[in-house]
Image (tube, rainbow, N blue to C red):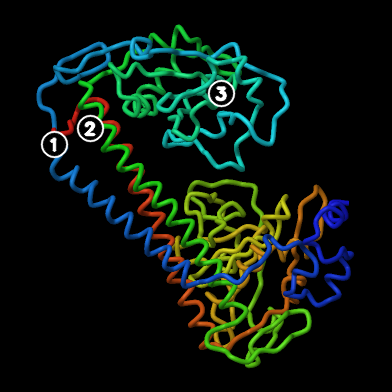
């Protein structure tokens, strides 16, 4: 029924076929016959994507130079502190209640049960408040109310530099209102905080509201109810350590610079992902340097030099793991379905320890093994694939995973890993699933072995894999940079907002 509905509503489906036809058609690589394309495919300019990655890199390097300048020259430790009821602070810092720093603090009354419009006054809701204090302004995620409705509730309309705080349900999320959301309205679960700019710099206050001390205080003061909330009067009573106004601006400048680097790093990750996906589509179907192509039934257009093989022709084994409901802290590490990340790496924090079976050696993993998710409650997760790179010295795997080992004279494990991961991203394995008792979706061993693949020469496989691995390593390095930047921001916030280090005047 789901397929029929999609066929009727979505022109991207070529046709609806029974699952038996998919199986009888030799498990074709040409999934466009059976599933809607993820997006309308266009020719992607790989060189342009690479230039975009390099341009973002240059931006990040420039911002990181500014950060290094702060760390080297502008930040100085504080040796003389005074004791206060909220901890040690510099002698020239004050303590003020949050309410004393606000020109206005407002939540109710507001609108409810209204009809949203295709355009009009944008609405800010809790889901749009991001972890860095920014607000998602993507037009596709915004909702709009009529100007007529908005005019009835002027106090829920925000100005640039206002802060919005989630005070019900998921408490403590903060958003800084940018110029493009001037005049937007907030929902009932948010509170509008308008800073008194003679006393507090809005960005400084934003960072304090994002800090661990403030969030701990918010949690302590909120009632112990199923749905957490906090009253305006209690919120206003929370003490805030307050440096002089010019120092507030310098602190906000340092933290904003780190946030800029974090934002660019995220942008780089998205650009590298796009580059990797484009390269996978290009290299795994067109190869390297080919000029002549042929149409292969059920596969599509491939280089004339390539052959079409079944998976069973190029692998040594496809072996499912073993089930074990017992746990043993002194046992052997067992990888499970959630150990397989969507980027093809092993999640080294997602495993269990189980008593080793008598034939444990039969299930030991070694570098170069491919792990394929054969069973899941979700169609989307069946076929998720990772390459074991020796993350653990001794490691086995569960029955929801299949270990694939290649015949090294016929296939590169890295090449096969990439083509299986590419097929999963294209939605291919959804078409091969059986539904088991309890609703579990499964691609069995016999089904997996019959999949047909276009195979380059072993030398070309290795060249393709090296290119994709280089991009994957670049992606991994960018993720590590993002992690370091987040840790840096967390450390700087804990020191700067408590006055343990100070920003030297320019």
Please name the residue shown 50% across and 18% down the image. Answer: 191
Specify whether 89 is left or right of 159. Answer: left
Labelled disc at residue 343: none
315 w.r.t. 356: above or below: below
Give x and y (percent) for residue 216: 40, 21
Judge whether 74 appears above or below 26 on screen. Answer: above
Q: Nearer the viewer, residue 33 or 164?
A: 164
Q: Are marks 1 and 2 in contact (CB under 8 Å)?
A: no
Residue 321 seen? no
Q: Earlier in the sequence, mark 1 or mark 3?
A: 3
Residue 150 place in picture, x, y as percent: 61, 21
For mark 2, give the secondary structure: helix
Q: Dividing the picture into quarters, in which one does residue 184 lie?
A: top right
Q: Secondary structure at mark 3?
A: strand
User: Measured along the vertical axis of the image, is residue 285 above or below residue 475?
Assistant: below
Q: Is residue 494 visible?
A: yes
> Would you name the residue on which mark 3 appears?
186
* Residue sitting at x 88%, y 51%: 1
The residue pinned by badge 1 equals 506
Q: Are marks 1 and 3 in contact (CB under 8 Å)?
A: no
Q: Earlier in the sequence, mark 1 or mark 2?
A: 2
Residue 113, quarter of the rendered image:
top right
For marks 1 and 2, give the CA distance. 9 Å
Disc with the residue nearer the chain's start (3 vs 2): 3
Residue 231 shown left or right of residue 250 in the figure: right
| Residue behind mark 2 | 250
Element type at mark 1: loop
In percent of the image, x 46 and y 62: which residue is there? Answer: 272
Q: Position of residue 348 (x, y in %)?
A: 47, 54
Q: Is residue 34 left or right of residue 399?
A: right
Give the alpha-carbon distance from disc 3 to disc 2, as whole Å: 29 Å
């Amino acid at each position: 029924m789901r397929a029929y509905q999609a066929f009727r509503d979505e022109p991207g489906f070529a046709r609806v076929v029974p699952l038996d036809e998919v199986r009888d058609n030799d498990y074709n690589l040409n999934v466009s016959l059976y599933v809607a394309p993820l997006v309308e495919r266009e020719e992607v300019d790989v060189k342009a994507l690479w230039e975009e990655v390099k341009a973002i890199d240059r931006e990040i390097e420039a911002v990181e130079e500014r950060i290094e300048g702060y760390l080297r020259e502008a930040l100085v430790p504080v040796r003389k502190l005074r004791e206060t009821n909220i901890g040690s602070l510099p002698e020239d810092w004050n303590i003020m209640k949050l309410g004393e720093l606000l020109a206005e603090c407002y939540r109710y009354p507001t609108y409810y049960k209204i009809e949203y419009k295709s355009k009009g006054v944008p609405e800010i809701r809790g889901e749009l408040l991001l972890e860095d204090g920014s607000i998602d302004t993507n037009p596709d995620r915004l909702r709009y109310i009529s100007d007529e409705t908005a005019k009835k509730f002027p106090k829920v309309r925000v100005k640039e530099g206002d802060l919005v705080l989630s005070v019900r349900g998921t408490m403590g999320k903060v958003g800084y209102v940018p110029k493009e959301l001037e005049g937007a309205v907030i929902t009932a679960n948010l509170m509008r905080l308008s800073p008194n700019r003679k006393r507090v710099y809005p960005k400084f206050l934003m960072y304090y509201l994002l800090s661990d001390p403030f969030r701990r205080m918010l949690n302590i003061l909120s009632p112990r109810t199923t749905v957490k909330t906090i009253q305006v009067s209690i919120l206003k009573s929370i003490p805030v350590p307050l440096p002089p106004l010019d120092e507030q601006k310098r602190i906000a400048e340092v933290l904003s610079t780190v946030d800029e680097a974090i934002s660019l790093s995220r942008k780089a990750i998205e650009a590298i992902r796009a580059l990797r996906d484009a390269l996978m589509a290009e290299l795994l179907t067109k190869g390297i340097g080919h000029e002549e192509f042929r149409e292969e039934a059920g596969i599509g257009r491939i280089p004339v030099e390539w052959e079409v093989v079944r998976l069973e022709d190029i692998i040594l084994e496809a072996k499912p793991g073993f089930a074990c409901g017992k746990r043993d802290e002194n046992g052997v590490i067992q990888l499970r379905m959630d150990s397989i990340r969507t980027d093809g790496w092993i999640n080294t924090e997602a495993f269990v320890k189980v008593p080793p079976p008598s034939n444990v050696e039969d299930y030991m993993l070694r570098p170069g093994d491919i792990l394929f998710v054969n069973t899941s409650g979700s169609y989307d997760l069946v076929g998720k694939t990772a390459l074991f790179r020796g993350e653990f010295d001794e490691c086995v795997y569960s029955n929801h995973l299949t270990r694939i080992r290649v015949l090294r004279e016929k296939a590169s494990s890295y090449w096969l890993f990439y083509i299986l991961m590419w097929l999963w991203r294209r939605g291919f394995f959804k078409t091969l699933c059986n539904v088991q008792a309890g609703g579990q979706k499964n691609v069995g061993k016999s089904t997996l072995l019959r999949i047909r693949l276009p195979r380059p020469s072993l030398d070309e496989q290795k060249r393709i894999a090296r290119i994709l691995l280089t991009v994957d390593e670049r992606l991994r390095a960018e993720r590590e940079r993002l992690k370091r930047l987040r840790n840096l921001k967390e450390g700087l916030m804990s020191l700067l907002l408590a006055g343990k280090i100070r920003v030297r005047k320019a």
